[in-house]
Amino acid sequence: VTAEPDNWTRTSCVYCGVGCQMEVGRSAGRVVAVRPANSPVNRGHLCVKGRYAFDFNHADDRITSPMIRRDGGWEPVCWDEALDFTARRLQEIVDRHGPDAVGVLGSARATNEENYLAQKFARVVIGTNNVDCCARVCHTPSAKALKTMLGTGAATNAFDDIEATNAFLLCGANPTENHPVVGARIKQRVLQGARLIVVDPRRTELAALADVHLAVRPGGNVPLFNAMAATLVEEGLVDRDFVAARVVGFADYVAFVADYTPEKMAAVCGVAAGDIRAAARLYAAGRPSMCFHGLGVTEHLQGTEGVMALINLALLTGNLGKPGAGINPLRGQNNVQGAAQMGCDPASLTGAQSFKDAGPRFEAVWGRKLPASHGLDLLQMMDAARDGELKAIWAFGYDIYQSLADAAETGTALSRLDLLIVQDLFLNRTATFGTVFFPAASVFEKDGTFMNSDRRVQRVRQVLPPPGDARPDWWIIQALAERLGKPDGFAFDGPEAVWNEVRALWPAGAGLSYPRLDNDSPNWPCPDERHPGTPVLHADHFADGKAAELARIPFVATPEQVDDTYPLLLTTGRTLNHFNAGTMSYRTPNATLAPSDTLDIAPVDAAAYGLKDGDIVRVRSRYGHACLPVHVTPAMRPGQLFTSFHRPDLFVNQLTSSVRDRLVHAPEYKVTAVRLEKP
Ligand code: SF4
């Protein structure tokens, strides 16, 4: 608390996908305190980010005026000039190159209503399906796998099931640091007796508590999960009744997985066969067993397929459609589920609905034919910009250059755009290439809703007005639509009116009115106002009343391998005190708690390189280099390194690999071959 608040406003946390509810204290036009609120998600708790990292809102370098780049520098202008300039440039590009020369990127930092308007702007005003968001680089593989195999691209179970489970399978996630309130609930349940299997190359806090820690080699998830499945089949641990009733493709799957015995896969994934078998037995015996996974599963060449291999395990053991079970992606950002769910995805409409099924309904409400062309996803937009085919990008609250893998390639792509509209609180690294800057309102300065990891839509409430000429994203989108001569469908008087259009188009969210959300946050699907919500998906059936089909996932090794020149494997991830690219948390006292990213290295490797804590080392990959302070820790296995990517000036994504998920193109942030050099 920096001053005694004279007013408290209940809202949603500005950081991770747990979606904690909080009260924000205001005094003299500033946010001065945060305290936890009681909700089914956080039960009166907050972590160090939600509780203390709010001062970014009043940082000295907050941008509060629109700006246009002129003569190489940024010139502050009024909104009329910024909007007229941008509308004219966009129209010229559309007239000359067609609507598919423009791309729009929604944001997990924006509300559901703003993401809905962003994709509507792309499809209605510009006439393109080139619309995506930052979900592309984290959990789009989860959404794709869950949607393909089960019918809904979201977590199957609510967080409340943590207390109902007997065993956790925690894969590629470190929730005590990255989703701390949920991590604490998992830890508490384990201390009460639930069994715990952790799949993680590092010895995290929960790995140290686990019954079985499978320290998989980065890139080895698919052979590991297949070997667990082979164990279930071979040792008679399959839930035969569940499989007979709700699963198809079992005989073919049994034949397929016979080649993936733990004994064959041990050398491939770096885990002893006995440990793989022990994990499979625990998962099967735990029933209900609950799987949580993070980006250690999704950010790989086989990210989507890794999630599919996990779903196989749940199908084989009957761990779906019941409390305390399921396949549950831990979402990284507070509204990353919502950004994609609202339609910031080139291949689907709001509610993850298909063009084929829902297209006519959208055309009726929007009064316009939907674009026919296949849209580009974020990574395809970068390729098209590099190749001169994409001419303009509008990026909301998303520092693409800082956060996409292989930054040199990203920089090349962004530098070739004719128009880059950057919309943010600060001049981020992407703005290096920006043409126009729109100053956005922060999450404390607007109304709306976020959607958390367990399918709850929760209110975001305005605590104080935006500074200077900063405006909410929804206001800016509508103003630009008007300048482009398309005011129809963009004349909402506020977020609630936008949300009511979302409810009209998305049957699973129809029951989630603002008045209801004032007192309640049921897990969707929630098709009408009396519906209690759906904490557990697939209780009776999978998509469209069908059974689910087991997926035969052959292992494909990443091309990013160690060799004599690059002998170490680097993975990247997040840590407790900071958030993503550090835009917000590094402008708060949390920067004092954790002043820098570090390069975590095993003691044996540190000794071999003559390194000790605090030494600065240059890390070089096939893509670039970055200098980092060393942290020697037994949590690392020999031959492997870890760093976070929070501190903007260290710019860790200069190092990360250009390999992408085979199906949905999420970058393979988790596997980069590197070497260490003296700086
Ligand atoms: Fe915010 Fe996530 Fe921490 Fe909860 S756990 S306070 S949502 S950062």
Image: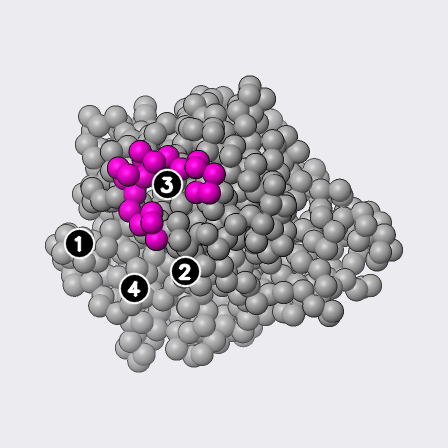
Q: Which mark is residue 129?
A: 4
Quadrant containing the N terminus in the rendered view: top right
Q: Residue furthest top?
A: 192
Q: Can you tell which quarter of the image residue 66 is in?
A: bottom left
Q: Position of residue 50 (x, y in %)?
A: 54, 33
Please tell me which residue is depicted at 79% across the width and 64% down the height of the picture.
677
Camera-side residue of 139 and 171: 171
Q: Nearer the viewer, mark 3 or mark 1?
A: 3
Of the two numbered discs 2 and 4 in the rendering, the one whose residue sits closer to the viewer? 2
Residue underneath mark 1 = 357
Rounded to the nearest angstrom, the CA distance separating label 4 from label 3 is 34 Å
Q: Is residue 92 left or right of residue 365?
A: right
Q: Is residue 362 magenta?
A: no
Badge nearest the viewer, 2 or 3: 3
Residue shown at the point (19%, 32%) measured from the top left: 528
The reply to whether residue 458 is in sight is: no
User: Which residue bears the numbered disc 2?
Assistant: 664
The vertical placement of 68 against 493, above or below, is: below
Q: Secondary structure at mark 3?
A: helix
How far apart in space, not on screen, are marks 3 and 1 (Cα)? 27 Å
CB within 8 Å, label 2 to label 4: no
